[in-house]
Image (tube, helix red, strand yellow):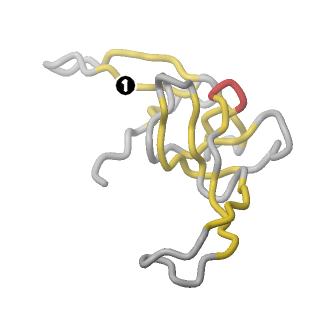
Amino acid sequence: MNIVKGDKVIVISGNHKGKVGEVLKVFPDRMRVLIKGINLIKRHTRPTQKNPQGGIVEKEAPIHLSNVMLYDDKTGRGTRIRHRRLDDEKRTKVRVSVLSGEVIPVKTGS
């Protein structure tokens, strides 16, 4: 999987083609990604203690990995990814944009 949580991706096919968003969650076993604000569905929920009102809630649904591409801020469009090892003492493996040749940092943290 070349796409990880926190990456900025662009949808390349389907109803949401051309939209850009941040990856919230990756499902590697199902080859799907959850993107913030894209592929929203309406979920009808019944009243619970957590949500006493109930009603209709909009939430994101997963999109297949083949329908998204990593977004390159430098070029302003989708790009493929190459892997390269850096010439440091650990020979760290990094992702590199095919279009711009820039190293794509992996967002760490939450």
Is 32 rendered above or below residue 10?
A: above
- Residue 55 falls in which quadrant of the image? bottom right
- Residue 85 falls in which quadrant of the image? top left
Quick check: 105 left or right of 55?
Answer: left
Estimate the x, y position of residue 29 in percent, counting from the top left: 47, 22
Quick check: 34 left or right of 5?
Answer: right
Asked whether 103 or 18 is in front, the reply is 18
Asked whether 91 or 59 is in front, the reply is 59
Q: Type of residue at label 1? A: Val
Estimate the x, y position of residue 1 in percent, counting from the top left: 48, 22
Quadrant where the C terminus sits is: bottom left
Kindly give the residue lying farthest to the right in the view shown. Answer: 15
- Residue 79 falls in which quadrant of the image? top right
Quick check: 37 left or right of 106?
Answer: right
Callout 1: helix, strand or loop?
strand
Is 44 rendered above or below residue 36?
A: below
The residue singled out by tag 1 in the image is: 94
Estimate the x, y position of residue 98 in percent, counting from the top left: 60, 22
Kindly give the residue lying farthest to the bottom in the view shown. Answer: 53
Q: Residue at x 82, y 42 (%)?
A: 17
Estimate the x, y position of residue 74 in percent, counting from the top left: 62, 44
